[in-house]
Image: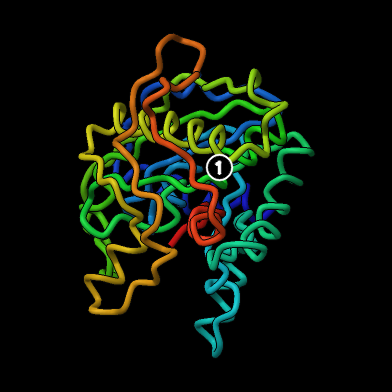
Amino acid sequence: MFYWVMKRIFLGPVLKLLFRPWVKGLDNIPAEGPAIIASNHLSFSDSIFMPLMVRRPVVFLAKSEYFTGTGIKGRLTALFFRLTNQLPMDRSGGAASAASLTAGMEVLTHGGLLGIYPEGTRSPDSRLYRGKVGVARLALQAGVPVVPVAMIGTDKVQPIGKRLPNIRRIGMIFGEPLDFSHYRDQAEDRDIQRKVTDQIMFELMRLSGQEYVDEYAAVVKLRLAGKAVEPAAAAELLAPPAPASGSTGEPTSGAGNGGSSGDTRTADDGGAAAG
């Protein structure tokens, strides 16, 4: 109820008036049934603007820190995220991230729309970074289509670290649904998960026009902050996403190789949270 009231009566109309969002390809979102909406991630406000324009409710996986804050501000933030259909996502990798993805699977099982940021965190410099395979695991296990969406200009509205937004127009482009059902019996294959993820990232790169960076955004953020980068976090360097060989959503054979070591698995799992 809170979600609907804020979207239709209070927050939604004000945001539409101020930021005049333009949208292309909105009809690519299924009118009913489960689907994953996979988006690039330029700004905190992506999780506000995109659901605002989608007719159906969108449930996002958001970083768990938003739900564990202390003090009045922390509690209000946690309450807001819960009331706006967002679920906590542990981004530490491995078993913790896998457990968090279970909540996303429940959304899909009940026929809902699940919003995911394959990069796992906001881009530090408006470029597109390597996707983590959590989005592929969910898509393959649930057998649902993936709708890529490119957010345009939200990094200019609310850059990282800026609390008050700049009033300017933003946009979004929804691509055609990607069907990976022909891979469903290989849902646990790491190479297939990487291929599917690469195809999703290629579509995001094509729709957004962003430069692709062959590295995890989280690693770049650590480096920019002068912090040590764990070897596992920097593992499995991949070639830029390659376009599909046809219209079936299947990546070409050169779209990247999935690693099988324990370190790489930990670094590459999850990657769905906003933040």
- Find residue 21 and report its horizontal and vertical position in percent: 33, 37
Q: Mark 1 belongs to which amino acid?
A: Val
**Kind of element beneath mark 1:** helix
The residue that appears at 54% across and 48% down in the rendered structure is: 260
The residue that appears at 24% across and 54% down in the rendered structure is: 157
- Find residue 197 and report its horizontal and vertical position in percent: 48, 36
Please tell me how many numbered marks the rendered image carries.
1
Q: Nearer the viewer, residue 258 or 105?
A: 258
Question: How many other residues sit within 10 Å of disc 1, few (<14), some (14-19) or many (≥20)?
Answer: many
Q: Which of 24 and 119 is in front in this view?
A: 119
- Find residue 158 and report its horizontal and vertical position in percent: 27, 59
Please identify the residue farthest to the front as the structure is shown.
Answer: 261
- Relative side of 58 to 151, left or right: right
Q: Nearer the viewer, residue 256 or 212?
A: 256
Q: Nearer the viewer, residue 161 or 214?
A: 214
- Find residue 178 and report its horizontal and vertical position in percent: 52, 22
The residue that appears at 55% across and 42% down in the rendered structure is: 135
Q: Name the residue under label 1.
A: 135
Q: Is residue 72 above or below residue 240?
A: below
Q: Is residue 189 above or below residue 235?
A: above
- Relative side of 176 to 217, left or right: right
Quarter of the figure with residue 175: top left
The residue that appears at 65% across and 21% down in the rendered structure is: 181
